[in-house]
Amino acid sequence: MGSLLFYNGNILTMNEKCNDEIEAVVVKEDKIIYTGNYKESLKYTNHDTLNIDLKGRTLLPGFNDSHMHLISYGLSKYKVKLNEVNSIKELQEKLLEHMKNEEVKIFKDWVVGSGWNHENFIEKRLPTKEDLDKVISDRPMFLSRACYHMCVVNSKALELAGISKDTKDPEGGKIDRDPITGEPTGILRENAIYLVYDLIPFTNDIQEIKKIIIESIKDANKVGITSIQTDDFSHLKSYDKIIEAYKQLRNQNKLNARINLQMLLKDKKMLEKFLKLGIKTGDGDKWVRFGPLKLLADGSLGSRTAALEEPYSDDNTTNGVLIYSDEELKEIIEIAYTNGLQIAVHAIGDRCMNQVLTIYESIYKKYPKKDPRFRIIHSQICSEKILKKMRKLNVIADVQPIFIKTDMYMAEERIGTERMKWSYCWYQMLNKGIILSGGSDSPVEPFNPLLGIYSAVTRQDLHGKPKGGWYAEEKVKLQEALKIFTKNSAYCTYEEDIKGMIKEGMLADMVVLSDDITKISQSAIKDLKVDMTIVNGNIVYTRKNGVRG
């Protein structure tokens, strides 16, 4: 590990205290040792220094995805990809194509797919077990909707799970049924998903898990990601194997991104078992660190399981699903909070956000703690009251700007124009002093941060629609959007003193973009490439030569 000199470019430090234009950055080993004047920087170099002429390109702190599912992304490569299907017939054709070309049966006899969105289907209905049975009836099948809060399974999977018309809905979940016969349709929502999901034979082999992680990080490096806050615990049967895989990769120096583990422990029993390990938020090192307890408190807007205060505008028979009662959620959060865990709760609907914020407030009053950094992941359907309480409690909003490319085509239909005024309201949040961090929720959406930054500043889909932007008053300025995916995401994990800025003493995690992001049109941001990714002072990816292992 030698030294690097970056010069002759647009260096965006994300350091608000640094008002001077930075001409050069010098890296030695794993740290940034100098930022400032080019001529002065030469004093910190020698004959072994690699001089990198940026030629007008942008140098930034490495991107930090504040919420994704790295292992799930890796597993998705082995699933039937249904993101682009526009009809149930196309979905069936994709399944047939998969069966014909199937090589690696990583899920053994199961057929597992993801990414379908019935909002795009020309049939304008949900798929059913009968639709799947027509294609595959002798093997169990599990197909997740794009949001991962709803799935459709075939009759074989229902049979293996013992789900019939007599099966009661699990708490916090729903089994869709035929209105006449009462038979399950194959659609499962929220906690009902686990009745089948838990039967899928995911790999339990450490070497296979490590391979999935390494390959996934390689893809992340290609888009400039140097830090990943990942919710992996629910994607394989054993979280201890996941922890062990990350630790082995760290000890073998095979991690090319810094990992912060968001620990999904969905009930009191699981949490108490985990706490016996003595792990607290912040434990670990600069490569693998334990982050917050992650909880799923409601569903998604697309599946109408996000918990709303008032019924859905396009279906007044439901106002979504609260996964926990107030008492259950409070008990779990209180146990975690008093045992040294930061809390990050998935909440999309306003009813759920009110539930979570009320619990945060009561627990903080009961057990005041310096800087708890409560988090709400997604924070989509808000209100003025919600924003005021978030600011009062200094709650971080973990947002996914890339969501709007899909959600803009159904959100207003789901919740109506009045509630939309307080939804996906990033500008209002920033204006009120709420800290926003940026993620992708990959594999729900692509984890390319440049797509998230583009979405935040344009409020358009990837085809540039609608003209002028969707609820354009909520556009975010470019500098703020960049902070969301760098400095602010580091703040989420109490690591703002070591990463998220180009500053002397910081870890040398940086990214070189293919152009000057401040001089191109906003519409061109989505087309920018990453020319180089630097992690720990090492160039781990160059666009010309590819990922370096």
Image: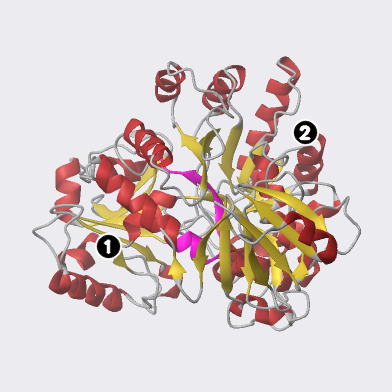
Question: Which residue lies at the image location 37% right of the left edge and 58% below the top edge?
Answer: 215
Residues at circles 1 and 2 in contact by the CB criterion of under 8 Å: no
Q: Which residue is mark 2?
A: 393
Q: Secondary structure at mark 2?
A: loop
**For residue 154, above or below residue 122:** above
**For residue 114, above or below residue 52:** above
Magenta region: which residues? Answer: 219-233
User: Quick check: can you spot residue 421?
Assistant: no
- Amino acid type, label 2: Leu
Q: Which residue is mark 1?
A: 128
State the residue in front, 402 or 149.
402
User: Quick check: can you spot residue 426?
Assistant: yes
Tell me which numbered mark, 1 or 2, is placed earlier along the sequence.
Answer: 1
Instruction: Answer with the quarter of the image where residue 416 lies.
Output: bottom right
**For residue 117, above or below residue 3:** below
Across and down, in percent, residue 53 comes to 68, 74
